[in-house]
Amino acid sequence: MRKAIEEAVNVFKNSIQSKGFSVLVLNAPTGYGKTVAGPLLYKACSDTGICYRAIHVFPLRSIVRDFYLCKLLGSLIEFLDESTASSIRNICGDSVASQELANVVKSLGLAVDDVAYQMGEVLGYECTRKAPLFDARYIVSTADSFFYNLFRIPVTEIFSSKKHYAIPRLRIYTGFVYFDEAHMIVEESDEESKMFTLFLHSLSILKAMRTPTVLASATLPAKLIDEVARRVGDAVAVVMLGARSEKSGNRVVVEDKEFADAVASISWCTELRSKEEAVRIAIDAASSYRVFVGCDTIKNAINRFRILATKLGEEEVVMLNGLMTRGDRAKSLEKLRKAKVLVATSVAEAGIDTSFDVLITDGARIPSLVQRSGRVCRYIDKKCEEARIYIVKEFASQELISFVNKHNNICWRLPFDYGGYVGYQRLVDMWTEPRTDSVLEGVLYRLAYPLYVSPQLIKSELQKIGGALTRSILAEVTLVDDLSMLSSFTVEKLYMNSLSLDLEKVIRLYEKGCIATAVAYSVVDDGRVVNVEDIAKSDRYKELLRRVVEEKWRRGLSYFKLVESLAKNDMRLTFILRSDCYRPGEGIVALV
């Protein structure tokens, strides 16, 4: 166990024992072992007898999927049937749980049925368990699902006239909450941030209910840590890695010489290059090294992918982005095991446990740059002599360009100066705190603080913010050539042929002629898709669908009414994507 993780566990446990409650901030570099820290800190909390379950919160569905399948079920793989275990190994590859993590999970006494996930999609594997009411002992949840359940909008009853919100809410209060990759929850670029507002109000509620809570990240800005301390007060404890061990008030800096020396022994080289030079470097480096091309936009990613695939061959280059079906993404992850180059957006910044030798990256978002750099020479216990980081000038912030011009000796794996290298924390601390969303704040106060709120009030408050509590309304989109084929699908096949998209992106696809129609369907107990209905032709639903597509001012509310109407008949909704708007291995090219 790394020293800062060990110290964090001790600080957290002592704080709970002395105060009955704690909020811990764990700021440690990428690749330091924060994945293991979640179950370890849960064990520390559980051992004190004041929390029953863990709710491990991630910002992205892709990370929820990987952590649940590869880390939790991967830790219990010996208890799965051979077919399921084989599927987990195939899905996860090198990302399957380490022996250290497996030992921690087993020490908690967790069985396969004790671990579950919650997000706005269904994992179509036989061994998986979804827990929208947070009724497992270790739940991996998206931030969106967590916030809905916390603020009295249970995810199973968003569209229902009844709201049994007390059940998941009390399970949060009696548990342990671990915000993993916490920087991504508050990284919205909008001046008024919904997620930042939800995050701060969540901390206030968790403090009031004395629910042990942890925030973990490699890139937490000092201003954010200060804001957390201001809201939580003397119950907060901060543990971070530093050049020397010291303690000041509620802040503990831990020296981990073994880790720092190993990282500093790598020759770190950072250069600014033009976009044309960056492509040439990727082509040349791929002959001898594994290359990660990190992109801030899907447009940049697809452009670079096409150039590199043409030059190096399609088998040597892999794409990952948020516009790919789940099946396509799975194929890319399988292909990544042998490919020389990965081209990816932010979906690869966390949750993909793979090491590269060279990084070529955009630099508009500093946390993304640090996270991507954590994939270079990732395994410090293995030989890696040189880490080369090339930043594309045309897509880098001016602050980053100035910093690199001033300091060309940057170590992207240490937040502090060490061994002749400059750490990355001062770049992270350039973060500009977004304003809270004043309209959402009023809604949250009215939802969270009365002892009772009626379903009618919840519906009314949601209407004030366009029907969505979090960043956007998500809709399911399915890629299928022939609508009649859906009746032969299993729910797993449907899941793999689909992806979740922001509703506004679905409308853009409508405008481009890329949505063939919208269909409703049911799923029976054996996993077959049945009762497929084209709702664009349905007298019951076509008017609501028209409002979703054509009437922007009430689009969100119309969408929720449509889903609610379908749910009453035990039916689900998906939009059918035309195949000529999708390119295998790249995603929905019509949106680029």
Image (cartoon, rainbow, N blue to C red):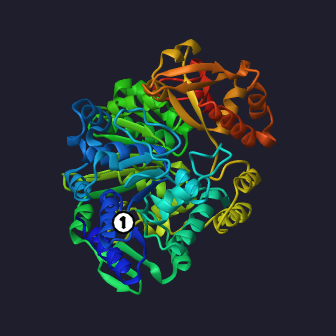
Picture coordinates of residue 61, whole percent (x, y)? 48, 45
Picture coordinates of residue 171, whole percent (x, y)? 47, 60
User: Toward which corner of the image does residue 578 lie, by quadrant?
Assistant: top right
- Residue at horizontal 76 percent and vertical 31 percent from the top: 544
Residue 10 against residue 271 in the figure, above or below: below
**Residue marked by disc 1:** 28
User: Toward which corner of the image does residue 481 lie, by quadrant?
Assistant: top right
Picture coordinates of residue 476, whole percent (x, y)? 58, 33
Res. 313 in view: no
Q: Quadrant of the N terminus?
A: bottom left
Q: Nearer the viewer, residue 547 or 582?
A: 547
Residue 503 against residue 408 in the figure, above or below: above
Residue 535 against residue 144 in the figure, above or below: above
Q: Quadrant of the C terminus?
A: top right
- Residue at horizontal 37 percent and vertical 74 percent from the top: 239
- Residue at horizontal 37 percent and vertical 60 percent from the top: 412
User: Toward which corner of the image does residue 51 lie, by quadrant?
Assistant: bottom left
- In the shown orientation, is residue 298 left or right of residue 469? left
Q: Please tell me how crowded label 1 is: few (under 14), some (14-19), or many (20+) other residues with Cα within 10 Å.
A: many
Q: Amino acid under label 1?
A: Ala
Q: Nearer the viewer, residue 416 or 510?
A: 510
- In the shown orientation, is residue 107 left or right of residue 168? left
Q: Secondary structure at mark 1?
A: loop
